[in-house]
Structure formats: C-alpha cells, structure tokens
Image (cartoon, rainbow, N blue to C red):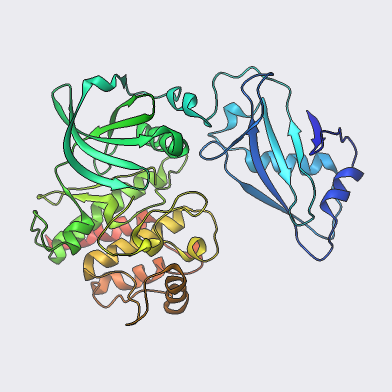
Amino acid sequence: MAIIDGEGNNSSGTNSFEKKVGVNKNVKRIIHIGWKHKIDERSKFIHIKEPIAGAKTIELDQAKKYRLAEVKNMILEAMKTEENSKYFEGSVVDIENRAAASSKIHILTNDFEFKENLPNNRQTVHNVDLSIPVIDEKNIHFSEILLGKGAFGTVKRATWLETDVAVKTMELSTSNKYIICEMNIMDKVRHPNIISIMAVSFSQSQCHIVMEYFDSESLRSVLFNGNSKLKLKLNEKNKSLISYQICKAITFLHESRPAILHKDIKPDNILVDRHYTTKVCDLGLSKCDAMPSALHTTIGHNFQGTPLYMAPEILIQYKEATIYSDVWSLACVIVELYSQKNVWTLPLGVGYNLINLRGIVSTLKAPNLSKMPIYLRSLLKECFLHEPEKRPSAHTLLNTFKAGTESLE
C-alpha cells in the first residue's frame, strides 16, 4: 500500500506526516476522512459517499506523536464497515487535516480487480445488485393519480402485471445517492408495517421504484387535514394501536444487522388505512404542505431529515444520524398523534424557521406531554433527553405500547 500526499509525492517516513498534522498546537488534531475509488487503472479516482462510505473523522491526542503506519491503521479501521468491506481493496482513503491546513494525503491500494462499480453516476444506478426484477418502463401503466410528492421524487398510482402499485419516480441526474440507498434498503426489508418494493425500472433520465399499493392516507393528513376521507376515530385505543405498529417497523429496522436508520420519521412518512393498519414508507429520505414552512420539508445533503422532527445533535450540533436520533423523531410523531398538535409550539409572533426552532428545542428540552397517557409520560420524556445514548430504544417503546394496547382491549 503506497502513501502519497496531495501533490503526488511519495511519503514513506514519519516526519512528512507529522509536519502536516501538527502545524497548529492550539487546535485539536482532527483528521477528516473521505473515500475515493476508481473502476480500473485508466479511470480517475471519484469521491464515494454513503451508504458505502460517508465522511468520518478521527481525533488525535495533541500531546502524542504518531507514526504514519499507526495513523493509517486508525483511518482504515474507521472506514471499515460490513457494507464496504468487499470494496475495501482497490480503494483510496483521502485524508484532509483541515485544522492544520495540510494538503491531502491518500492511502492508496494497488489492486484494481473489483467485482462491481461503486455508486457515483447513472451507470452504477443501473448496476445495483437487487433481488427484485428490473422491468421495462413500458410495462408500467401510470395513472394521473398523484399519491405523494417529496424532496427526491413523486409517487403515482399505476398498474403492473394487472396489479395496483405505487411508483416513485426520481431523476437520475440529481438523486443517484438517494436512489441507490432507497433501492438497497427496500430490497433488504420485508415487514408487514413497512411498504415493500416490488420492482425497479429505468429510462434514460429516470428511475422508477415500483412498490405495493396501500390504500391509505398519511398520518399527517389523518391528524391535521379536516377533509381526510378516512374519518378515523382517534381514541386512545386506536392511537395506541397506530403507535404500536410504527414502533414495530422502527424496531425491525434498528435491530436488523447491520442496523438500518430511517433518518426521516415523521407523520408524512407513515400511512394509515381505514382499518388502522399502519405502514412506514420513504426509506430514502419528503415534503408536506400542511404547514407553510421549510420545517416540514426533507433536507438532503449533509443535513438530512425534517427539521421539526430532528434530534438536537443533528439540528443544532450537525452530527450524524443514529438510532437515538431516530427514537427522538419517533417520539415526536407519537406526541403529535396523541395531542393532534405540532410537537413544538412556538410563541405567538415567532415565525417557524430553523433559528427559532433551534432556540425552542434548546430551551424547552422536551415538548408538552400533558396530552399523553400517564403511563407514557416518563418514557417519552426520556426520548427527548439531549444525551442521545440515554434515550430508550424503539424496542422499549414497542413493549410499552404492546402492554398498553393489551390493557385497552
């Protein structure tokens, strides 16, 4: 394995690395790591992002000197996951020490015999290895019925093989990362409370994800739209039943191996039918028009999710999502379900924007739980702890709703 710096110079000793990392003694020695990959020896290296890699950091002890080999091993271990292990040979880790204003260092392997490409352009979207069929676009018969519209595509009702389906259509040129993520995750997930993928299809410029059609409305529509066609009776028993099914879905995702994060749990991404059957959807990261505010719109890129339901470590500290941030979002949904009001209430005259929302979350610490059943209050309060690891698991919530549902029967 060869080591080269940003100018393409070989770097085999300790000194060149220490000069780059230890420039400023007053700042933390943080190394920001990114993943690069190339398809063959003639190709250029291309930055690769989630789900295969994603940005990571390691922090070095300011008082300690490190050998290059030691730091290299720390970086490789930080990047290794179950998902990227089969791609690890033949890849590059580029290291950028921003605090020391250093040039980039690349850890470069020399093996270019890979089985498949990594996601970065349209061609790799077509080559994603899935268990479901890839079908011809002409076999999908689209209706004009729009079921939903989100940050990364639209969902229309359609038929395929004489079967009603819902088809999510995304533009290939702008959303490849999210398309690959959603296809891969949906292909792995089979659960009665999660919308299932059935097939995928590609045109020159679009990708179609063919999903089961679930005759339902979003939980947001049920809660806040007075014209909802379902007219559900939202008593405590039915609210508990809906919550139980949502928790089943999220517990299944979190306890899969490797764990799957939803990252965008909100009423818009939860579907309910007239029998109170509930399913979670949109596993790729959507938009709602119930509140005239950007706080109900999914944000992509590094700041992922929907602000109103974001945990403080993401909303305020810009950290990466975890199962604990999913639990925060899940608790927000449960609070809205029981109270039938927005989880965070801003003072009169204060507009809904990110700055004000951050202030409310920082000040209140937890939303108003007075509308919650007494048996739920203490547990939900723990879901809003600002120390993520102290929040209960989705499984704990599931068990609580299971007991609550049984007691109401």
Pick the front one: 128 or 274: 128
Residue 354 in picture, x, y percent from top left = 44, 67
**Farthest-out residue, bottom:** 348
Is residue 389 visible from the viewing direction of this image?
no
Q: Residue at x 42, y 51 (%)?
A: 263
- Asked if residue 170 is positioned above or below residue 66 in the image, the reply reads above
Quadrant of the rendered image containing residue 206: top left
Q: Residue at x 17, y 21 (%)?
A: 161
Residue 196 in picture, x, y percent from top left = 27, 35
Quadrant location of the N terminus in the rendered image: top right
Is residue 294 visible from the viewing direction of this image?
yes
Say left or right for 51 vs 55.
Answer: left
- Asked if residue 134 is positioned above or below residue 365 in the image, the reply reads above
Q: How many marks?
A: 0
Q: Residue at x 42, y 78 (%)?
A: 364
Say left or right for 59 vs 79.
Answer: right
- Asked if residue 86 is positioned above or below residue 286 in the image, the reply reads above
Q: Residue at x 43, y 53 (%)?
A: 299
Say left or right for 121 vs 269.
Answer: right
Pick the front one: 143 or 317: 143
